[in-house]
Structure formats: structure tokens, C-alpha cells
Amino acid sequence: MNTILVTGATGFLGGAVTVNLLKKRENNRLLLLVRGDSPSEGLTRLQGNLAKFGVDASLLNTLTAENILIGDLAEPERFTDDARLDAVTHVMNCAAVASFGTNPYIWKVNVEGTFQFARRMSLVSGLKRFIHVGTAMSCAPEANTLVTESELNTLRDQHIVEYTWSKATVEKMMTESLPNLPLVIARPSIVVGHSDHGCTPSPSIFWVFRMALTLGKFMCELEDRIDVVPVDYCADALELLLTAENVDKSIIHISAGLHSSVTFAEIDKAMAKASGQIPVAETYQKVNYRELAESKKSFSSLFGPCNERIVLRAMNLYGHFSKLNVVFSNDKLLELGMPPSSKFTDYLHRCVTSTKDATIAELMEVDFK
Ligand SMILES: NC(=O)c1ccc[n+]([C@@H]2O[C@H](COP(=O)([O-])OP(=O)(O)OC[C@H]3O[C@@H](n4cnc5c(N)ncnc54)[C@H](OP(=O)(O)O)[C@@H]3O)[C@@H](O)[C@H]2O)c1
């Protein structure tokens, strides 16, 4: 019987992987690090998140307050002396401040708190695996390339946002300073929606595509490729990595790769089909920041009520990522027996349906916490 500690289970990736583990409860004891004032409050919030993945109430109700470890990675010293940690055999570390904004906790949580937590877990004698969920973007990839998993030696200047820099930093610290940690670094590419439930679990990043195509302008070429995977694929891959053999100390992308990545032109077609509109390809314009800024005054009429300055800033940040035109190699993951992911365009219609009643401003909140 394994005892699996999951962090970030109230979030998108952590929620999806917890759903998988919950379904295999007979082999696993679950301990879930959740922020909150009490285990019962944490449990209620967790169950609310897992319900968004279509889990039956009967399965959700198998979780009790005993599965909850109340703790905040901004203050790890307040939970790291909990004796239950000593019985943990596997860690799935999905918690992070995953924000493209300027959240003041990015460094404190993603670097300092995460490192202290990992150091504590490196002292657990029965620990077999510590999966740290990084991000494929933490290597600050060179534009127009097929990116393979690389060691981390990036500089702050190479990162578009503080978030990816924080993720790169903690990976390096754990790798270099915790030799006893049975570390596997899983680096998902861009996780958008769920194959069956669309954006019900989270609209993270989906709004960017909708925004760019509604405007008919963005910073990428329509022929640029983007590496997107659904959250359930990501969860299946993380589950596989939990027990896969011969992966200790490795870095592994969870990505669409060359086979399943798609172009913006393909996304345009799929989005138009799902929304009953015509593709914007004929009139689409690749623009720079200054040209985007000239459209600022039209944002509210196009996207619904929004702060046009904040939307412009978001477009600029995501625009930089969109024009990278990178694909993350998935060879290592496939070699472990994972099938290729579906394409974003295969389930995009479910993302459209599940977000049709929300404005861009409402959808983007999740990425600027
Ligand atoms: N989404 C993507 O496209 C993507 C791509 C590549 C990598 N990743 C990585 O995947 C991981 C999860 O991302 P996500 O998209 O699932 O983010 P998310 O939905 O925002 O979930 C973040 C989780 O971390 C928890 N958390 C945040 N601050 C915490 C703290 N101080 N102490 C304890 N828990 C804390 C949150 O708990 P609360 O509910 O209490 O806020 C939530 O459960 C991150 O490491 C991210 O870097 C994501």
C-alpha cells in the first residue's frame, strides 16, 4: 500500500491527478496538502474542486478530514513537523502560484517554501518518489525549435515572467542540493481544458485563443505551432511517472510533441466550427505590441466588460509565448509506454461549450491570481 501525498489538489493539475488516484483507492492511501483553517473546511473546498471533473459524489465522499493535511507552502514550518509525512512513500507536488501576474508570493511559495518542503521530504526514509511538477517553459526555450528536456541553466533575463523563473530556480535547487530526494521533474507543456469536460475544471489559457481569434490579430503567425495537452492526459502521465521504473533524477516533458501539437490555423478552424462562425484566417493579422495597443479601445465592445489596460498586458505576455513556435519533444514519455495525447483541436469544441456564457475578463482571472 502506497501513501501518496498530493499538493495542489484544489487546483487544475493537482485536481485531475487526485481524481485518478481516488479511483484507485484500494492501492493508495491519500494525504492531501490543502490550505485552510481546518481539515473539514479544506475537505469541502477539495471536494468542490474534484466535482468539477465529473466525479461521483459517492466517490468524493470516500475522502474524509483524515486525508487532509492543512498547510501553506508560504509557511512550511507550520506543517512540516506533522508525523504523517514520515509515512509518505510518494509525493506528487502540484502546488504552486501558477500566475502570470505579479503575485508577491511567487518566490516565497514556488522557490523558498517548495524547497523547504522538498528538503523535509528528502529525510523520509521510505520515500520512493518525489514528482515535482515543473513547466516545460522553465528552460526558456529558443523560438522555432523542437525542445528536448535540458538541464537548467537559465538567467532571469531569458524569462518572460517571474513565474517561469521561479519554477526554473527551484528545479535547479532541488537537483543540486537534495541528492537524497528521489526526484523526478515532470514538465507539462501548455495544459488547456479536459478531453471530456472542456473548461469546466478550469478555463486557464483557453481564453487567450478566444481573445486572439475574436480580435483577429495576435503576435504569432497562423502557421506557428503550439504544444497543448488536456489536463486528463497530463494527470495520466503524472500517474504513470509515480511508479515508472528507471526515471529517478530525470526530467520528462508531458507534451503533445510533433505528432499532436497544432497550428493556430487549425485552432482557428476548430474554434470557428465549434462557435458556428467563419474562421478569421482570411483577415488575420500578425501584429506587434504597438499595433495591439492601438486596438485597446475596442476590447470592451469585442470581449465584454473588461479593464482594457489589463487585457492588453495579458495579450502582450501570452503573445510572447504564442510566437515562440516551439514544440516540446515527448519521446521520453512515449518510451515509458504513455500513448500520444489527443490534439487540442479534437476536444476544443467542449472548451467552447463550457465557456460560452463567460466573458474574457471572467475567464482570465484564473491566470492572474
Ligand atoms: N496549467 C498549465 O498550463 C501548466 C503548465 C505547465 C506546468 N504547470 C504546473 O502545474 C502546477 C499546477 O498548476 P495549475 O495550473 O494546476 O495551477 P492552479 O490551478 O492555480 O493550482 C495551484 C494549486 O497550488 C495550490 N497552492 C498555491 N499556493 C499555495 C500555497 N502557498 N500553499 C499550498 N498550496 C498552494 C493551490 O491551492 P489553493 O486552492 O489554496 O489556491 C492550488 O491547489 C504548477 O506547478 C504549474 O507550474 C501548469
Image (cartoon, helix red, strand yellow):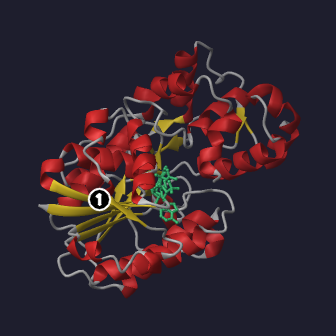
Is residue 63 in view? yes
Quadrant where the image shows the C terminus:
bottom right
Residue situated furthest top in the rendering: 276
Q: Ligand 1 near label 1 (Cβ, under 8 Å)?
A: no
Q: Residue at x 66, y 72 (%)?
A: 157
According to the picture, the residue beneath numbered tag 1 turns out to be 66
Q: Is residue 360 above or below residue 163?
A: above
Q: Is residue 62 left or right of residue 225?
A: left
Q: Total number of numbered labels?
A: 1
Quadrant where the image shows the N terminus:
bottom left
Q: Is residue 26 left or right of residue 42?
A: left
Q: Position of residue 227 (x, y in %)?
A: 46, 45
Q: Is residue 302 left or right of residue 235?
A: right
As helix, strand or loop, the secondary structure at mark 1 comes to: helix
Q: Is residue 248 above or below residue 1?
A: below
- Which quadrant would residue 298 be assigned to in this image? top right
Q: Position of residue 54 (x, y in %)?
A: 36, 32
Residues packed near mark 1 inside 10 Å, few (<14), some (14 to 19) or many (20 plus): few
Is residue 169 in view? no
Q: Position of residue 285 (x, y in %)?
A: 73, 33
Q: Position of residue 83 (x, y in %)?
A: 28, 77
- The one nearer the camera, 52 or 172, is 52
- Which quadrant would residue 362 be assigned to in this image? top right
Disc 1 marks which amino acid? Glu
Q: Residue at x 39, y 48 (%)?
A: 15
